[in-house]
Image (cartoon, rainbow, N blue to C red):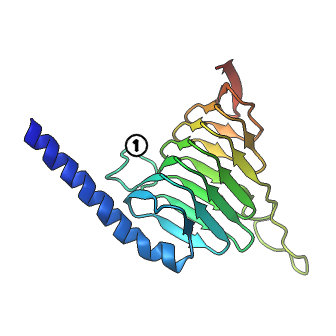
């Protein structure tokens, strides 16, 4: 049993080293900032036209090998020219999508379950295409997720949402309103469940 454990640990270590090598180039090409390079299992997809910033001890699962919960098998980080993504220390995530035109800020110790999607914008106007002679306006509002928040798998967080410290969001929720600290919320639309 001891030898199996040693071999398993060596495989895990080799995958983490491979993940760092595989993701180092896109981090450099897209000018992603970090205090310490995150631990990445798999390869992430980055489009950074604005700013992406990582703190310390960030852990990312990205791919079928690292998360078999059936969501899109890759972590996606996308910013427009005005978009900013800030990921503070000790954040963990699996196969998530963060899409920022303004700001997505994940504070310390946030945990994002598999397939969580966070969008600070509507992607397009209500018509789905620019009208002739009218400049397209895409609504965007900052999203801030407080420290020690847990967000369950398959949850979608929409523009303008602020989630307080220590909150828990149940799996599969659609969050389009602020969530107070120290409370459990779940559902579509998200509803109060209980205080922690």
Q: Please say whether residue 158 is visible from this viewpoint.
A: no
Residue at image position (61%, 33%) is 169
Q: Is residue 96 left or right of residue 83?
A: left
Quadrant of the frame with the N terminus: top left
The secondary element bearing badge 1 is classed as loop
Where does residue 23 sit, x and y in percent of width and height?
Answer: 41, 69
Quarter where residue 83 is shown: bottom right
Label tally: 1
Residue at image position (62%, 36%) is 173
Residue at the spot of label 1: 69
Residue at image position (46%, 54%) is 72
Q: Please say whether residue 69 is visible from this viewpoint.
A: yes
Where does residue 146 sit, x and y in percent of width and height?
Answer: 68, 41
Quarter where residue 17 is shown: bottom left
Quarter where residue 25 is shown: bottom left
Q: Is residue 187 left or right of residue 57?
A: right
Where does residue 155 sit, x and y in percent of width and height?
Answer: 59, 41
Residue at image position (72%, 30%) is 181
Label 1 CA crowd tier, 10 Å (few <14, some 14–19, many 20+)? some
Quadrant of the frame with the C terminus: top right
């Amino acid at each position: 049993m001891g030898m199996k454990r040693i071999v398993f640990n060596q495989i895990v270590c080799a995958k983490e080293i491979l993940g760092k090598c595989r993701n180092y180039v896109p981090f450099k090409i897209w000018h992603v900032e970090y205090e310490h390079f995150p631990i990445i299992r798999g390869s992430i997809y980055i489009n950074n036209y604005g700013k992406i910033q990582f703190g310390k001890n960030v852990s990312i699962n990205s791919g079928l090998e690292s998360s078999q919960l059936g969501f899109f098998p890759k972590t996606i980080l996308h910013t427009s020219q005005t978009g900013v993504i800030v990921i503070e220390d000790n954040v963990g995530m699996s196969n998530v999508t963060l899409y920022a035109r303004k700001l997505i800020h994940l504070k310390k110790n946030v945990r994002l379950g598999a397939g969580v999607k966070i969008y600070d914008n509507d992607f397009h106007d209500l018509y789905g295409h620019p009208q002739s002679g009218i400049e397209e306006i895409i609504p965007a509002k900052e999203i801030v997720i407080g420290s020690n928040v847990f967000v369950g798998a398959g949850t979608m967080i929409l523009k303008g949402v602020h989630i307080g410290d220590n909150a828990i969001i149940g799996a599969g929720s659609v969050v389009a309103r602020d969530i107070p600290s120290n409370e459990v919320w779940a559902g579509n639309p998200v509803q109060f469940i209980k205080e922690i």
